[in-house]
Image (cartoon, rainbow, N blue to C red):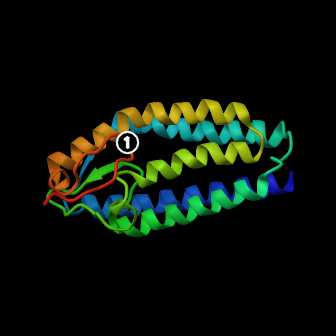
Amino acid sequence: MKFFILFFTVLVIQRLVELVIAKKNEKWMKDRGAKEFGQKHYHVMVMIHFAFFLSLLLEGGIYHSGIHPLWEYLLALFLITQAGRIWVISSLGKYWNTKIIVLPDAEVVATGPYKLFRHPNYLIVTMELIIVPLLFNAYWTLFVFAALNQLILLTRIPVEEGALKNETDYGRIHVRTPGWLGIVRKEK
């Protein structure tokens, strides 16, 4: 139970720090004329993530059924996702946000993980929504929120890609490949 409390606390603090970074980046971008897209589904996404934390707290903490027998491997995978999260945030710099905020005519970032995948952050979030509940045997949380995350991404990714294509050089830089993770290629 102590491990859950420590893990959960660190996860919440991490998310709060990310919200501070996102708010600072939002101000920086909007001061330069950035536009926001997808406001309606953003509120739904926030509710899903908030509900995930509540569900994890209830199922993994209050109704704690122990830690997964392979917890060391799951924790290692979680730490790898966190390294990926840091890589994503540092690669996007001032452009990273939890919202879809696009600076018109900005050059699209195609370095770091964005050189490999169109949406590495969504891959990381998807992995977290599987790994974290699994770590604490919170199977209802895992199934419900992994599914809800995929449903919200079915809305979010097309909105984000549409905004990037309309406002930036995204369509010229990134050639669409099958799947939401499609490998990024530059046109020749």
The answer to whether any part of residue 38 appears in the image is no
Q: Mark 1 sits on what residue?
A: 180
Q: Residues within 10 Å of mark 1 (few under 14, many from 20)?
A: some
Quarter of the view holding residue 154: top left
Q: Position of residue 138 (x, y in %)?
A: 74, 38
- Residue drawn 65% across and 42% down? 53
In front: 151, or 111?
111
Horizontally, residue 66 falls left or right of residue 75, namely right
Q: Residue at x 86, y 39 (%)?
A: 65
Residue 58 image position (x, y, % from top left): 76, 37
Where, by quadrant of the figure, is residue 38 drawn? top left
- Residue 63 pos. (x, y %): 84, 36
Question: From the viewer's perspective, is 45 left or right of 71?
Answer: left
Residue at figure coordinates x 27%, y 47% from the top left: 36
Which quadrant is home to the C terminus?
A: bottom left
Hey, what amino acid is under mark 1?
Answer: Trp
For the question of whether residue 153 can be seen, the reply is: yes
Q: How many marks?
A: 1
Q: Quadrant of residue 66?
A: top right
Q: Which residue is rendered at x = 51% and y = 36% of the image? A: 149
- Return the residue nearer the eye: 2 or 170: 170
Left or right: 57 as drawn, with respect to 77: right
User: Could you say whether the residue bearing mark 1 is in a helix, strand or loop?
Assistant: loop
